[in-house]
Amino acid sequence: MSDITLMLQKIEQGDPQAGDQLLPLVYQELRRLAAAKMSRESAAQTLQPTALVHEAWLRLGGDAQPNWQNRAHFFGAAAEAMRRILIDRARKRRAVRHGGEQVRVDAEVIDRVPDLNRSDDQLLAVHDALDRFAAEEPKKAELVKLRYFAGLTLEEAASALGVPQGTAKRWWTYSRAWLYRELRVE
């Protein structure tokens, strides 16, 4: 059992110091995910990876961590927090710079997850489509969030979700097709 899992169990048991001890254990992993995520953001993105990790940590509860079921649950929530932070920032920038106009994106945006250099409009279009997708296919949407917003590889995302890599690959193929249909320019 990993140190992270043990610390999450201590939090669940009500240990008041466990939240303080969790951050040092997960910080480097969160920082690595944030750095990978930020390296794919557009030049307009001014948020630094360290700031993204700190803001996500605060949104997760800071030192007063909620009860996490396991490591995957924690990192899934961290990915979701990072996604929401970036979405909020993109909405603010788009409202000021672009007058609120939305632009659809093509399937290449979903296909190029590791190399994506997104505009705010593309990011928001994917976010909106992903919300609709989550209503229909929550597990598959979680896979997309982990890959697209947290920058995990397919293998890392499969591990975080606790599913076999073959299943994750099928989910990824299905998800990309679903999102392509939603995001294609009409």
Image: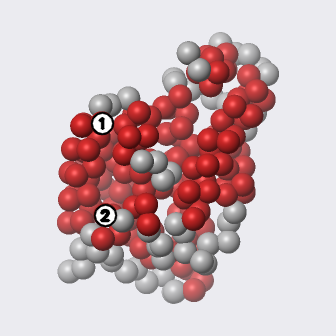
Percent x, y of residue 177: 20, 59
Relative side of 59 to 77, left or right: right
The answer to whether residue 55 is visible is no
The answer to whether residue 171 is visible is yes
Percent x, y of residue 140: 30, 44
- Residue 93 found in image quarter: bottom right
Which secondary structure, mark 1? Answer: helix
Name the residue rendered at 79%, 22% in the picture. 17
- Residue 107 found in image quarter: bottom left
Name the residue rendered at 44%, 66% in the picture. 115
Picture disc at residue 8? none
Give the position of the N terminus as an image quadrant: top right
Percent x, y of residue 2: 59, 20
Relative side of 152 to 110, left or right: right
Which secondary structure, mark 2? Answer: helix
Q: Nearer the viewer, residue 166 or 120?
A: 166
* Sequence-earlier tag: 1 or 2: 2
- Find disc 2 in the rendering and name its residue: 111
Identify the amino acid type marked 2.
Asp
- Find disc 1 in the rendering and name its residue: 165
**Quick one: label 1, few (<14), some, or many (20+) residues within 10 Å?**
some
Name the residue rendered at 20%, 80% in the picture. 186
Cα separation between marks 1 and 2: 18 Å
Identify the amino acid type marked 1.
Gln
User: Would you say the residues marked 1 and 2 are in contact, meaning their CB atoms lie under 8 Å apart?
Assistant: no
What is the count of numbered marks?
A: 2
Vertical order, 142 against 74 (above or below): below
